[in-house]
Amino acid sequence: MATRTSTQSILAEVSATLASSLAAEDILATVARQIGEAMSVFSCDIWEYEPGARQLTFVVTWCAAEENPYGGSVGDTVELDDWESMLAVVDGRRTVELHADDPDLPLTDRASFDKWGFQTTIDTPLVYVDRVIGVLGLVETRKPRRFTPIEHTLCGQLAVQAAIAIHNARSLRRLEEQNRQLQALREIGAALTSTLVFAEALDVMAREAAEALQVSRCIISEYTEGDDELTPLVAYERESTAGIGGRSVPPPRARPSARLLLGRGTQVEQASDPSLDPIVREELSERGEHTSLNVPLIYKGLPLGLMRLIETRGERHFGSDEIELAHGIGEQAALAFQNARLYRSLQEQADTDGLTGLYNHRHFFERLAEEVARAKRYELPLSMLMIDIDDFKAYNDAFGHPCGDALLRALAVVLQAQTRQQVDLVARYGGEEFAIILPNTDPESGLRAGERLRETINNGDIEQENAMRSLASEEACVEMNDRPSAARAVGERIRHTVETETFGSTKTPPAITVSVGVAGLRVHAETVDGLVEEADRALYRAKQLGKNQVAVA
């Protein structure tokens, strides 16, 4: 039995531990040992309580035996509402003593007593500033034991010390979390203001968000309004990273409209939630996702994407501070998306000719350099066309610049319609001159392409409305460059389609013709400048031959 002197000595020893410079987890372990030894029990366990989640987590244990049989259970979490005797401890704030020979022992406790050989247990609430933050559990397995009133009093006093230890541990963890969160925000801010490209900035955000919130996985997706879809761009897995760039990590099927999802604000999905849509719950389960914190990426009311913070190790209950942090990271991610979109828009404007919508002179040379390098690396054919409208100055003088601009725009439509989408590149080279890059196309095929373009323009209506009729032949155009034997048939079909059309919208429609120069890599030149020079010479020769001609370098 503890005397007044020994009680004071025990309390002083525990107080000294609390004031020591040990790490928080070490303090808890030392306190558990000191309490267990002071109470002369087989083991002393400390549980931490999460009121919002109604859960108890087994945080530390001490055992008088050399091998602690409960050590493997540290970290386990149990539902308070499933533990009958513990409800009286936490909700009733009472010290509860149980015995193996008690016929009224609750079933859940009876199972634990039988499994571990308990003879007596005593559980005391850990209260700090009028809040229950944990439970102190004492276990005796060696013989039945009845704790005396003085031991109950001592247990209550030690519980106060244990509550302080848990509070200190929580405070330290909170400080560590805040430092981690501040570091994450600092890293994300640096990524936004640095010269990192968009994809690299997203990598940083996904990593820092996952690490700051200590979740298993973070996925950032982009929202496409036209398709009403979320496309994953990057994923970060704790301990490993993987940029998935659109690989299949889709939002649950039950979300047919991403707009509805983004419009609902930050939300937490629990796979165990019975009210969750069954399809969503099934998919979370299939992917091993217990909890998902979904943060919409919205900039000035516009949905740009979604950040999902996922826990796969077990169910996670996010605190208000964590949700606020996730929301803050989401705002920065939304800004990154907006900046990327603005950059892409500016880049497109910088690469595009304002009048025709085609690529401009600068972008043409950039792409030509890339295609020349690729063709050389893989020994592929490459050709280019240089196209000039015949007598364009006379047309402008006769009908005015507005009509000349309309002619340039209409010709741009024709050129785009008669080339392979996503393969060939059409550019306005300057004035009334256009250039086309034909990857994987030899000069002979380039000649056929030039003839087809010339005939289309020479025999068809150059107004956009009529020029668009040739779009139906786009598939045949693809075959033309890939299968030269079909080229002349395609050209004849195009020529026949438009030969009865009338050009222009003036009172006396003029005959619109073009001259085309064709040059091929390796066949006529070995460099970018050389290829352009040879195509330009071929164009000049086509003019000398009487215009309305296609000439090969």
Image (cartoon, rainbow, N blue to C red):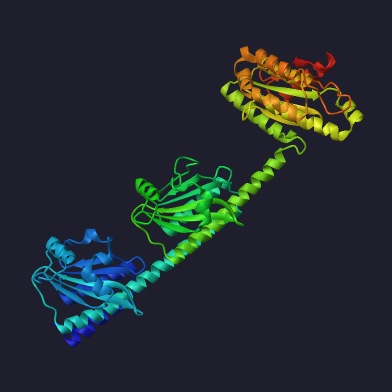
Can the viewer see residue 223 in this picture?
Answer: yes
Would residue 58 be visible to someone looking at this image? Answer: no
Q: In the displayed image of the protein, which residue is found farthest to the bottom? A: 4
Label count reads 0
Q: Quadrant of residue 439?
A: top right
Pinpoint residue 268: horizontal percent, then vertical percent: 43, 58
Q: Is residue 472 above or below residue 282?
A: above
Q: Is residue 4 shown left or right of residue 56?
A: left
Question: Which of the 4 image quadrants contains residue 384?
Answer: top right
- List x then y, in percent, for residue 12: 26, 82
Say which quadrant the C terminus sits in. top right
Residue 462 image point, x, y percent: 78, 26
Front residue of 64/548: it is 548
Instruction: Please report the residue visible at 45 percent of the width from the left and 48 percent of the height from the top.
Output: 236
Q: Residue at x 53, y 61 (%)?
A: 328
Quadrant the N terminus occupies:
bottom left
Judge whether 400 appears above or below 61 on screen: above
